[in-house]
Amino acid sequence: MKEKRRRLRINDDTMTTIVVSSLLFCVAVVVAGMVLAFFGVDVSTIVGNALTVFGTELGICGVMTIFNRWADRQDKQAEKRQERRLRREESENERKRNEQSKG
């Protein structure tokens, strides 16, 4: 029997998993930088770059989330327009049938 491959996902969302993984990586870099700084090593550039990378990734994920919400809203509006169009056509067909049956 073939085992199902497990994937690491948080809330079954890839974007959330990426952000959380990046945050954990940045925390590890900062902690390692603090340990190295204790021994007199200058790691400010490395720590600064790690935080910059996380901030950039978080911004990209925010833009993607905004786009997804916008796309979902557009889809819902298109569905509502389609439903209104169908209802209008049905009522018009019903009216025509009523006119034909009277006449």
Image (spheres, rainbow, N blue to C red):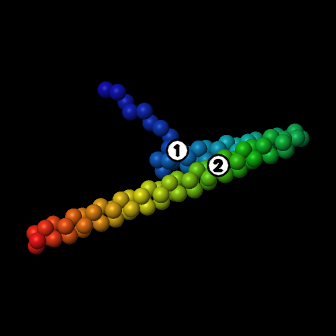
* In the foreground, 36 or 69: 69
Q: Quadrant of the N terminus?
A: top left
In which quarter of the view is residue 37 placed? top right
Q: Would residue 84 appear left or right of 37 to someone viewing this image? A: left
Q: Quadrant of the C terminus?
A: bottom left
Residue at (37, 30) in percent of width and height: 3
* Residue at 58% over, 50% down: 64
**Left or right: 39 with respect to 3?**
right
Which residue is tagged 1?
A: 14
| Secondary structure state at the residue bearing disc 1 | helix
Q: Name the residue at the top extreme.
A: 1
Residues at marks 2 and 1, CA–CA distance in whole angstroms: 13 Å
Which one is in front in this view, the residue at disc 2 or the one at disc 1? 2
State yes or no: discs 2 and 1 in contact (Cβ < 8 Å): no
Q: How far from the left and from the top, in percent, is residue 19?
A: 61, 47
Which residue position holds label 2? Answer: 60
